[in-house]
Amino acid sequence: MGCFKSEGHRLVFWYDPEQEFNSTLATLGLEEVRILRLDETGSFALKVKLELEDSSGQYLIYAPFAEPDRTRIRDTDTGRTKTTP
């Protein structure tokens, strides 16, 4: 995961729908990078962690599912799904 240092990224999202790397996450050897799992961390808790509690740390955000459809966004206020162009 050289993108943290070579490309200057603070957050890397990793979608793994087949869960091929589920069991090997801990062995990646990412010394200064914390791993957050979207199946273990709620959206609100993730937002608080990344924006308020640690706004400078490096994180690999692992999702053992497919990337969501970006044209359909859930409105957290109303609970309705909106379709974007």
Image (cartoon, rainbow, N blue to C red):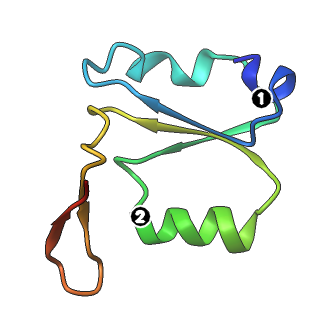
Measured in 3D between alpha carbons, the distance from the residue under mark 1 to the one under mark 2, in whole angstroms, is 22 Å
Q: At 79% across and 50% down in the image, what residue appears?
A: 57
- What's the residue type where badge 1 is placed? Phe
Number of marks: 2
Residue 16: horizontal and vertical position, in percent?
Answer: 35, 24
Rendered position, 14 above or below 39: above
Pointer 1 local density, CA inside 10 Å: few below 14, some 14–19, many at least 20: some
Q: Is residue 23 left or right of residue 52?
A: left
The residue where tag 1 is placed is 4
User: Which one is nearer the viewer's eye here, 54 or 85?
Assistant: 85
Q: Quadrant of residue 85?
A: bottom left
Quadrant of the rendering where the N terminus is positioned: top right
The residue where tag 2 is placed is 43
Rendered position, 62 above or below 6: below
Rendered position, 45 above or below 25: below
Task: Tell which circle, 1 or 2, labels the residue nearer the N-terminal end.
Answer: 1
Q: At 24% across and 43% down in the image, what residue appears?
A: 69
Q: Quadrant of residue 21?
A: top left
Residue 11: horizontal and vertical position, in percent?
Answer: 66, 42
Rendered position, 24 above or below 76: above
User: Which one is nearer the viewer's eye here, 22 or 85?
Assistant: 85
User: Which one is nearer the viewer's eye here, 42 or 75?
Assistant: 75
- What's the residue type where badge 2 is placed? Ser
Q: Is residue 56 left or right of residue 67?
A: right
Q: Quadrant of residue 5?
A: top right
Q: At 43% across and 57% down in the image, what residue appears?
A: 41
